Image (cartoon, helix red, strand yellow):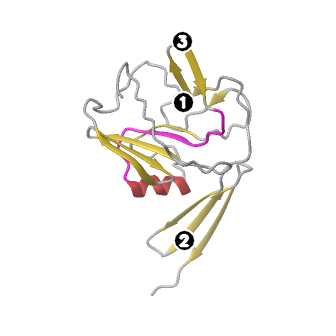
Amino acid sequence: IPGNNEVLIYQNIAFNFNEWNTISGVFKNDSIILYHNGIIVYQSLQSGFGTLQQNNYQTFLGKYRAANAQYFFDGKIDNIEIWEIGLSQDQIQQYISCPPTGNEPGLVGYWNFEEGSGTIAADLTSNGNNGTLVNGPTWSTDVPNQVCISCNATDTVVITELLSTNSFITETACLPFL
């Protein structure tokens, strides 16, 4: 429900506890599409959203205010992305397996929480919207492994795997011409 520059969507989603869940929301052309692990679980037309606007308002992730109370997310959060373009379902599924690098067109904020210590979450885009972590954050290496696969015109496959130790393994293989 839009109001006071806030949007609250509640949807019954069967979360897989003790597993990573990916939640994506797309606000585009006066519609809301909510994805759970890359699958559409909610879709609605609702006027009044317009487009993403730059402002000086604080943005809270994992925090909800109601009346005089504040509620904080009790769990692990990784890879938060804010885009100024509406991603397709295929793009959302791609970024679940292979996160952005930070310089993709339309990406306005990306925090991968790989700092390992401290209370600052670095914005990996050139926009510099670093976040302040509050309410006693803890760092964990229990993150999902992510594998990026890409092919180029010479039939080369490059596989990059992000490991929970914040390191990468990259392997290159050439495919036979068929």
Residue on which disc 1 sits: 61
Which residue corresponds to the image point at 50% horizontal and 14% vertical from the top-left? Answer: 67
- Magenta span has 78? yes
The residue tagged with tag 2: helix, strand or loop?
Answer: strand
In terms of sequence position, does the residue under pointer 2 or pointer 3 come before the other?
3
Q: Is residue 61 above or below residue 98?
A: above
Q: Residues within 10 Å of mark 3 (few under 14, many from 20)?
A: few
Task: Estimate the x, y position of residue 174 in percent, counting from the top left.
Answer: 56, 77
Mark 2–mark 3 Cα distance, whole angstroms, equals 54 Å
Q: Earlier in the sequence, mark 1 or mark 2?
A: 1
The disc at residue 157 is: 2
Please report the bounds of the magenta region as a residue range: 74-88
Which residue is outermost to the top? Answer: 68
- In the rendered image, the quadrant that contains the N terminus is top left
Q: Main secondary structure of the magenta part?
A: loop
Give the number of the mark in front: 1 or 2: 1
